[in-house]
Amino acid sequence: MSPVTSPESRSPEGHVPEGHVPEGHVPEGHVPEGHVPEGHVPEGHVQEGPAREEGRTHWRRSLAVAVPALLAAGGLGAAMASGALAVGLQIQDRPVDFTTSSLYGTQYGAAVVDQAVVRPDGSAGTVRVLRMGFADGMINGLCLSQKQQIGGATYTLMLVLGDDNPGSWEIRTKNTVLDLKNATGVLDMDGIVDLNTNGADVKTVKDASGAYVDNPLNSPQHRFGIQARYAKFDRIVGTAQDFQLPGLLTTPRLKLSVKPGSVACPTPPAPTGTPGTP
């Protein structure tokens, strides 16, 4: 016998008693436990699989990757707050574009050398560069920029050192080495200047005893070399295969940025005044 329901206990058609949810029905605004609406990612959850909207570049994620990478590459992390890079600066991974209002150095030497590189296909090779070295240097503002591919997008990692005064020569360096692929600017050398000297005979830095280090630029024998008491380069715009400041580098200001796209360093202003003595 079927149970009998009194008229008082029957619900009118379409009526749901309070607290009762018909099977398969979800009240508006309610998400059952364990259910995630399509396209929604709960807080703290990392969605797997294909992403978000096709063709959209997510700068925030890429910047989080790029900034620590540049800090590690330049060895700058611990020194940014003080402006003194006691461990020096080396950029050797790939060519770096640079500009400076003026670069002045004592005991200047240069030689043609072969620099080891890794080609785009991953194979090893060499490129011929002009390696320049200074025992002590003064730089009147410096901008370094290097392009990187991160997450399929192009970024420019830019490092700017110094102040905005074109007459201060505020950056001090020791044992500066540049491997130039190309550069434009104005060069002035003085003291005893030797052109076309043997590159292996060039002298720049001294050892602890005060004697000049033999072949500090690691030049092969009978390569073109230059030796001068000092050299001053103004308004340099160039590309360096290798940029090394293994000694102390001091600067009153250091600014690091990651910019989307391909961004060049600004054109350097002409220097004013004289650099003085390092």
Image (cartoon, rainbow, N blue to C red):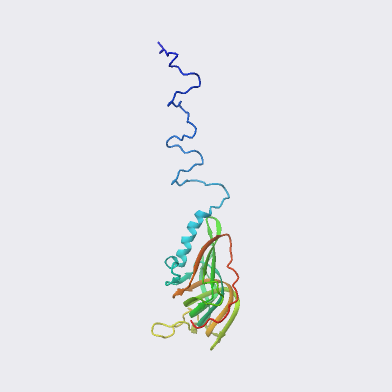
Number of numbered tags placed on the structure image? 0
Q: Is residue 137 visible?
A: yes
Q: Quadrant of the N terminus?
A: top left
Question: Foreground residue, 118 or 231?
Answer: 231
Residue 91 coordinates in the image, percent (x, y) = 49, 69
In the rendered view, tell whether residue 113 sits above or below residue 74: below
Q: Residue furthest bottom?
A: 192
Residue 58 coordinates in the image, percent (x, y) = 53, 52
154 with respect to 22 (left or right): right
Residue appearing at x 60%, y 74% in the figure: 269
Residue appearing at x 60%, y 79% in the figure: 186
Q: Residue furthest top?
A: 1
Residue 274 coordinates in the image, percent (x, y) = 55, 82
In the rendered view, tell whether residue 99 sits above or below residue 5: below
Question: Foreground residue, 43 or 211?
Answer: 43
Residue 200 coordinates in the image, percent (x, y) = 49, 82
Residue appearing at x 53%, y 74% in the figure: 179
Specify the quadrant of the image occupied by residue 183: bottom right
Q: Is residue 219 visible?
A: no
Specify the quadrant of the image occupied by residue 223: bottom right
Specify the quadrant of the image occupied by residue 103: bottom right
